[in-house]
Image (cartoon, rainbow, N blue to C red):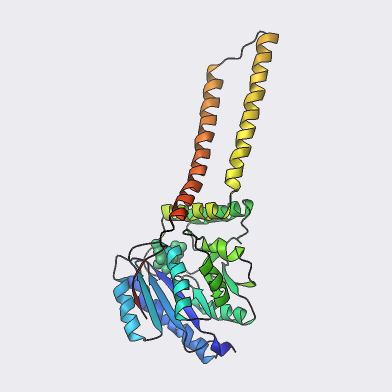
Amino acid sequence: MAKDTILAIVVPCYNEAELIKSTIERLLFVLSDLEKKEKISDLSYVYLVDDGSKDDSWYEIAKCVARFPNKVKAAKFSTNFGNQKALLAGMLETKKIGCSAVVTIDADLQQDENKIEEFIDKYDKGAKIVFGIRNDRNTDAFFKKVTALAFYKLMNILGVKIPKNHSDYRLVSFEALEVLEKFQETDLFLRGFFHEIGFKSDSVYFDVKPRQVGKSKFNLFSLSALAVNGITSYSIVPLKMICIIGFLSTLFGLVMGIYIIIARFMWNDSPDGWATAIITTTFFGGIEVFCIGIVAEYLGQIFREVKKRPRYLIEEELL
Ligand code: UDP
Ligand code: MG
């Protein structure tokens, strides 16, 4: 049975020229080992998505495609669409080419590639999605660690139950890919998506290695964009909160007003104005602008979704 499993390993790449060759060699080694153990079919392959790299990544990828025919395939985006789109394209394109399951892994192989065997074992036992969960965040810088944990905590409070230390290292079966294909959202938040669809799932725990070559391709801006998209595409609790904040501040204003009128007429005592007035106006002004900002995030989300533009553009594909 398992021998029929065609596994596609999807790798998003952005400016990874220095490490593409060794990454492909290591992944092909994993594939051939699993083929020897008769856990997967020898039609299995590695599929790279060059996310509009500005360095020689595509040149390096093309060399490997020529060197390992049928074993390495690749697509090149016309420009940088971001890691989530590269993962999405990899999964949808390999489904078209043909596969029984996909494992997505980063080009720097910070996620232990030797765990792919465990993903396959769980798939063989019937899991339709296998989540890769990091054992810890020791390799992350302090700031990234704190913000990532805060993000997962916030998502849980907002009702999106993603386990903390979740990653984009996961196995997705053909059945789950069929569902993925039906979700045409422009900004699909993959980590939320695979938890929400409710297929039989399992988890694999892995250690994160430090990056061997180059630097992280994410910056504070792209990470916060990913986090905000995660929230706005899976929860409308922030919008509901605005209502509650508005109600509470109106109530506060009302109580203050009544108190001031009573104080004025009963005890002829009008409270000192300046400080109170300025503090309350700036405080509530701040809350108002913040709330408009939250509404704006959702408006932006609707704006992008409603246009239904293609989610990515493939300029060239090497099969
Ligand atoms: N990546 C991508 N597009 C981008 C940024 C990153 O395809 O715009 C890829 C990158 O090449 C790598 C993976 O996404 O394969 C994860 O990126 P990185 O290792 O830089 O992130 P980190 O490990 O710091 O989370
Ligand atoms: Mg990395």
| Residue 197 horizontal/vertical position (percent) | 61, 65
Nearer to the camera, 224 or 312: 312
**As drawn, 61 above or below 278:** below
Nearer to the camera, 58 or 218: 58
**As drawn, 196 above or below 267:** below
| Residue 175 horizontal/vertical position (percent) | 57, 75
Residue lying furthest front: 307
Residue lying furthest top: 268
| Residue 76 horizontal/vertical position (percent) | 35, 71
In this rendering, does residue 146 appear at all? no
In this rendering, does residue 75 appear at all? yes
* Residue occupying the point 57% across, 80% down: 120
Q: Is residue 68 left or right of residue 186?
A: left
| Residue 315 horizontal/vertical position (percent) | 32, 70
* Residue occupying the point 39% across, 71% down: 49
* Residue occupying the point 48% across, 56% down: 226
Q: How many marks?
A: 0
State the quadrant of the N terminus.
Answer: bottom right
State the quadrant of the C terminus.
Answer: bottom left
**As drawn, 213 above or below 162:** below
Q: Is residue 181 left or right of residue 19?
A: right
Q: Is residue 178 left or right of residue 75?
A: right
Q: Residue 219, located in which quarter of the rendered image? A: bottom left
Q: Is residue 291 left or right of residue 52?
A: right
* Residue occupying the point 30% across, 65% down: 54
Residue lying furthest right: 266
